[in-house]
Image (cartoon, rainbow, N blue to C red):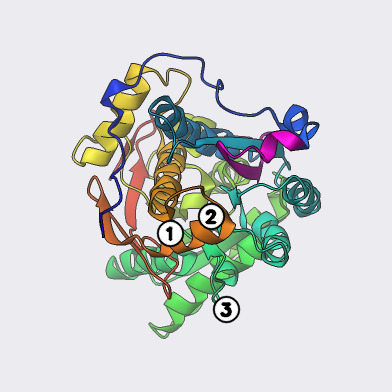
Amino acid sequence: MRSPPRPVPLAGLTRRAFAATALGGAASLAAPALLAQSNRIVLGQSAAFSGPAAQLGIQFNAGAQLYFDHLNQQGGVNGQRVEIVKLDDGYEPDRCAENTRQLLSRGCTALFGYIGTPTSLAALPLATKAETPFIAPFTGAMGLRQPFNRLAFHLRASYNDETELIVRQLTGLGLNNVAVFHQNDSYGKAGLDGVTLALQQRQLKPKATATVERNSVDVAQAVATIVAAKPQAVVQISAYASCAAFVREARKAGFGGTFFNVSFVGTQALADALGKDGAGVAISQVVPNPFSTARPITREFLDAIARGGNKVQPNYSSLEGFLAARLLAEGARRAGGRVGAGTLVSGLEAIGDTSFGGFSISLSADNHVASRFSELSMLTGDGRVRT
């Protein structure tokens, strides 16, 4: 059997309008016949493009579109263009569910790049019922991975992987008194569960816990509760706006310990929100450092931006979108012929063990989590990140 073609390098990317191949959200939905054309693989994406979590959706989508733009310039996948229909859910589950129904009713080949745990949990049952693949959600929640769902494929490591890394780092430094500040929803609960599990494995438990509502920066009560407990470190499980607010207010209240975040926080968005107050704030990462040229994949990513993705900001979120797009394209190539929902699942499962420029990937019929990569990074206080 002839091996499927490998991803086309991005060295030949030319300057073009950033959104030239993306279908506009509302406009595209007014023309359902467009989605049924055989020369297109149409991906539906419901994500936060407005509100306090907007940078997560904007940057992930930008990175994915950067890869698909080049792919389409080279003829797409087996002659099919890959296009994204994107709808804004503001990081709200009800809006996400309605967007998902619209996308599924228009016959999208797959759902792709959903942002967040509560939104993805609202969408996955709808995708499953419609027998539509659900690919590369921007979340590490175990509730989307267990029980196993043949239609769900994950690029990133889980929150359990990330929180284990964080707790291992903290306890290795002798910091055993750990508090958890978390969003009051399924995302926050997933992260809290991960921290609690990692601490339990070391005969420890959280020193204190406190919550913030989704899409809110009202952290006063959470700060009072956690600062009063006098922890040595705080693990934050929320989005960048509320985490930045908590860091500032906790420091004003006299907290002198360290802050750790999981990757969903949005590293660049958090750095931008904190400015100089970000110095020393740590974040676990599930993709390589997008500013380092140590791996071929990051060189490819940065070269793509330099050659034509001038509207793409290089950061962890956009690199994750770029990698997610590459993962989907690889599965589509291996599907062969005209790509549909069923053949895309088979194609992704056929990827096996491979590397995207030094970023290890593994998918099979019984493993739908492509990567368990995780590492820690730290904000420098001047908008930069070091690992």
Distance in Å between CA atoms under marks 3 and 1: 19 Å
- Of the numbered discs 3 and 1, the one sitting upstream in the chain is 3
Residue 142 point in image, percent of width and height: 54, 70
Going by the numbered disc 2, the residue's amino acid type is: Ile
Mark 2 — residue?
135
Q: Secondary structure at mark 1?
A: helix
Mark 1, other Cα within 10 Å: few <14 / some 14–19 / many ≥20: many
Mark 2, other Cα within 10 Å: few <14 / some 14–19 / many ≥20: many
The residue located at (48%, 20%) in the rendering is 311
Magenta stretch: give its range. 33-49
Mark 1 — residue?
348
- Of the numbered discs 2 and 1, the one sitting upstream in the chain is 2
Going by the numbered disc 1, the residue's amino acid type is: Leu
Which of discs 2 and 1 lies nearer the camera? The answer is: 1
Relative to 340, residue 89 above or below: above
Q: Secondary structure at mark 3?
A: loop
Along the horizontal axis of the image, is 136 left or right of 309?
Answer: right
Going by the numbered disc 3, the residue's amino acid type is: Pro
Q: Hey, which quadrant is residue 204 in on the image?
A: bottom left
- Marks 2/1 in contact by CB < 8 Å: the verdict is yes
Q: Is residue 40 magenta?
A: yes
